[in-house]
């Protein structure tokens, strides 16, 4: 399978996968950056002291650390595609929930959970994109997809400049719910890792994404014939 993808021509199939994974990381970067953008307003409204402010900042970072560790291992069990979907869902929904919070302690808990989703995404996206990119474009696209995180952080900064004063900080967190739209497209257009399917002998799933070759599969080997 890896040889087929390595030698394949870069086409619309691979472009869609790249674009969706890039969008996932852009929203990930937005969610990472939005706390710094909204912090002064949050401190003022929730009457936070220096200790509470540090706690809130640490909650998201610890969540990202645990998310990368836990979901990195979990992706081998449930699959990379499901891990990406769970990660998007977590960072989108729980950052959206922040818009309704009025307690610093609850804020910290919710940001920790959202951070887990943010941390889960990057290593799994890189792994899956590396598998589904022809060798001729792999280095370029892996470099480009990593730009998604700083690009998302830049968008959060621009959103703060444009909307923070007029609409308030809570709206900027509600905007993270838009990322849920990506989930539907990931479900429809992003394949699971073949490293997940092949050892399980899931022939039907493989044929769904690679309908042209005739597949002869067992749990140890996979042969492609025309």
Image (cartoon, rainbow, N blue to C red):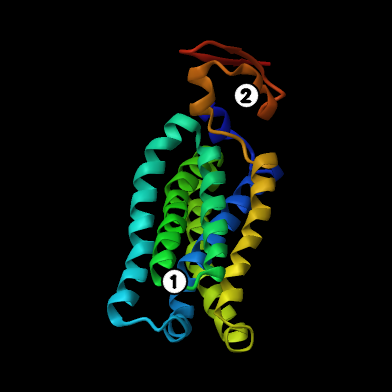
Residue at figure coordinates x 71%, y 24% from the top left: 211
Q: Position of residue 7 (x, y in %)?
A: 57, 34
Above or below, 120 against 151 in this view is above
Check disc 1 and report the residue beneath it: 103
Above or below, 127 against 154 in this view is above
Above or below, 48 against 97 in this view is below
What is the secondary structure assignment of the residue under circle 1?
loop
Nearest the eye: 135 or 103: 103
Check disc 2 and report the residue beneath it: 206
The quarter of the displayed image where residue 223 is located? top right
Residue at figure coordinates x 72%, y 23% from the top left: 212
Q: Position of residue 42 (x, y in %)?
A: 46, 80
Residue at figure coordinates x 44%, y 85% from the top left: 40
Residue at figure coordinates x 62%, y 68% from the top left: 175
Answer left or right for 160 relative to 58.
right
What is the secondary structure assignment of the residue under circle 2?
helix
């Amino acid at each position: 399978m890896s040889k087929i993808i390595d030698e394949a021509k870069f086409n619309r199939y691979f472009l869609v996968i790249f674009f969706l994974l890039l969008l996932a990381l852009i929203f990930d970067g937005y969610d990472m950056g939005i706390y710094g953008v909204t912090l002064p307003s949050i401190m003022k409204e929730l009457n936070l002291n220096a200790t509470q402010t540090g706690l809130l900042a640490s909650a998201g970072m610890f969540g990202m650390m645990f998310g990368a560790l836990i979901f990195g291992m979990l992706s081998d069990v449930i699959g990379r595609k499901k891990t990406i979907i769970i990660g998007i869902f977590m960072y989108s929904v729980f950052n959206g929930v922040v818009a309704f919070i009025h307690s610093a302690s609850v804020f910290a808990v919710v940001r920790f959970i959202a951070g887990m989703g943010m941390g889960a995404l990057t290593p799994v996206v890189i792994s899956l994109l590396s598998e589904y990119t022809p060798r001729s474009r792999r280095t370029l696209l892996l470099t480009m997809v990593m730009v998604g995180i700083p690009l998302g952080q830049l968008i959060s900064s621009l959103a703060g400049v444009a909307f923070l004063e007029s609409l308030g900080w809570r709206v900027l967190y509600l905007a993270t719910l838009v990322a849920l739209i990506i989930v539907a497209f990931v479900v429809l257009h992003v394949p699971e890792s073949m490293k997940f399917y092949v050892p399980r002998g899931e022939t039907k799933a493989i044929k769904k994404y690679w309908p042209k070759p005739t597949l002869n599969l067992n749990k140890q080997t996979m042969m492609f014939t025309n």
